[in-house]
Image (spheres, rainbow, N blue to C red):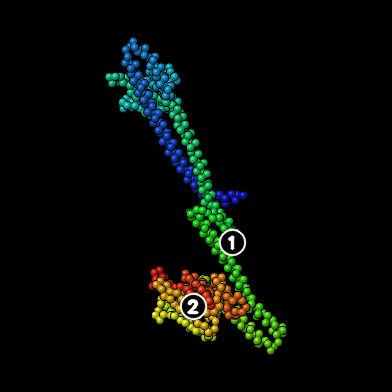
Amino acid sequence: MIERFKRRNSSLYWNQFALTAGMVLLTMLLLGVSFFALSYGTTAAEKRGEMRTRAELIAQMAATYLTAEENQRVDQQEAFGKLAEVAARMSDVDFLICTTQGGVVLTTDESLGGRSVTLPREMVEEILSAEALFDGRSDISGAYESKKLAVGVPMYDVGGELLGIVVALMDEAEMMNIWRAFMGLFFIIFATILLISFAASSLTSMRQIKPITDMVQATRAYADGNFDVRIPELNRSDEVGELARSFNAMADSLAETERQRRDFIANVSHELKTPMTTIAGYTDGILDGTIPPERQQHYLRIISDESRRLSKLVRRMLDVSRLQAKELKKEKFDICESMRLALLSMEQKIIDRGLDVEAEIPEDSVKVVGERELITQVIYNLLENATKFAAPDTPLYLGLQVMEEQVVVSVRNHGATIPPEEIPLLFERFHKSDKSRSEDKDGYGLGLYIVNTILAQHKETITVTSVDGVTTFAFTLRRSEAPHSI
């Protein structure tokens, strides 16, 4: 159970989801910290500005009260006290009206009523020296258990004479309540965005990982020998869609390779079975006396021929294997010389068949790019195939057509017409045109397969036409003078 949990958490989906979700969460946290700092600073600045405005207003009112005539001061004292108390309640700010030495003569904070309170000397000196204001935190010389936000301003009369000091005080808890309201709204928005981001991340990760999960399951099916599984086609043009299409193309190639492998095994088994059965049957007949002594020489000759045929077949199959594993060593060589060499090698077979050679090979050298031995083998195999299937006493053609960037080598014979449906099968392993593997003792169905393999390695093409008994094989080669030849 633990191992399965570990595998699940280490999967690509969870890694992708964790990465995306982590980035979103980190971004939101950074935004949150920035917002908290900015909002707290802004709220504090606004509150201090409000406290300063209130303190200046109270200072003006107190100056009017203190500079009034003696008979008017008594009447104004009660009104002034009520007005200061209303201002304090409206803004959650308490006010201290002090002398120039810092002694509190009037306050709106009932908790200080009847107590002798004096402002700290540092606060008084800062307010009077700056002749502006004090902005900070203070417990007013121990009058409060904890420090409060404090803003102090000097108080002047109309003539500019210093009359005293006004200090506005506010508990930080009041400001925090306002700040918490902002934070509550932010957290709601934060949680909503986070949920939406996680959901989008989950869907995106699942969409990205789903094709890969399908590929994993398909790969397991291929390991079990089932090559019919395909990835559902995705209507997307990104890398994942391209990967899915490439995977299906690979699956088609694997299925075709598996089909060819099975056909190859079946064909090899058939080709090997015939000579081996002949050899075993005649050998047993000689050993157990079924074949009389006077006939044994005849059947021993058959056994010898079949053994050579079997050996030749094995060598041809080894040639095919070597060709498929061979690394090409391209060079510039004269294709005309290779054509003449192949024609000379086939001379005896052509004479035995009674064919009339028609050769159109330029006298001048024509340089092409490729591996000389392999291309010579291609020409030889095509000539051998054309000779074998040509009708006796008919022309056999070998020609070269030179074009600007490539040359075309053609081999043509006269014989039976190859049906159109059979032409695509000519280059398959062990395919024979006569449909009878027992009649063609000299053929193995590998000659044209070797031709096609060599030309495919050279990235060249070969075409076949067969009309009214005239069959032509033609393949291309790139000239050495052409651009990008090597």
Amino acid type shown at disc 2: Val
Q: Residue placed at 58% from the left, 68% from the top?
A: 260
Furthest residue to the left?
A: 159
Q: Residue placed at 58% from the left, 73% from the top?
A: 431
- Measured along the vertical axis of the image, is residue 127 above or below residue 19? above
Q: Quick one: label 2, few (<14), some, or many (20+) residues within 10 Å? A: many
Mark 1 secondary-structure assignment: loop
The residue nearer to you, when weighing 360 against 30, is 360
The residue nearer to you, when weighing 179 against 164, is 179
Q: Residue placed at 59% from the left, 70% from the top?
A: 264
Mark 2 secondary-structure assignment: strand
- Measured along the vertical axis of the image, is residue 231 above or below residue 275? above
The residue nearer to you, when weighing 215 against 429, is 429
In terms of sequence position, does the residue under pointer 1 or pointer 2 come before the other? 1
What is the quadrant of the C terminus in the image?
Answer: bottom left
Q: Quick one: label 1, few (<14), some, or many (20+) residues within 10 Å? A: some
Indicate the position of residue 14 as horizontal and vertical percent values: 54, 49
Determine the image quadrant of residue 352: bottom right
Question: Mark 1 to mark 2: distance in Å?
Answer: 39 Å
Callout in the foreground (1, 2): 2
The residue nearer to you, when weighing 471 against 483, is 471
Amino acid type shown at disc 1: Phe
- Drawn side of residue 159 relative to residue 279, left or right: left
Residue under numbered circle 1: 227
Q: Residue placed at 49% from the left, 77% from the top?
A: 411
Furthest residue to the right?
A: 289
- Drawn side of residue 350 relative to residue 280, left or right: left
- Drawn side of residue 481 relative to residue 431, left or right: left
Furthest residue to the bottom?
A: 294
Residue under numbered circle 2: 411
Indicate the position of residue 138 as horizontal and vertical percent values: 40, 27
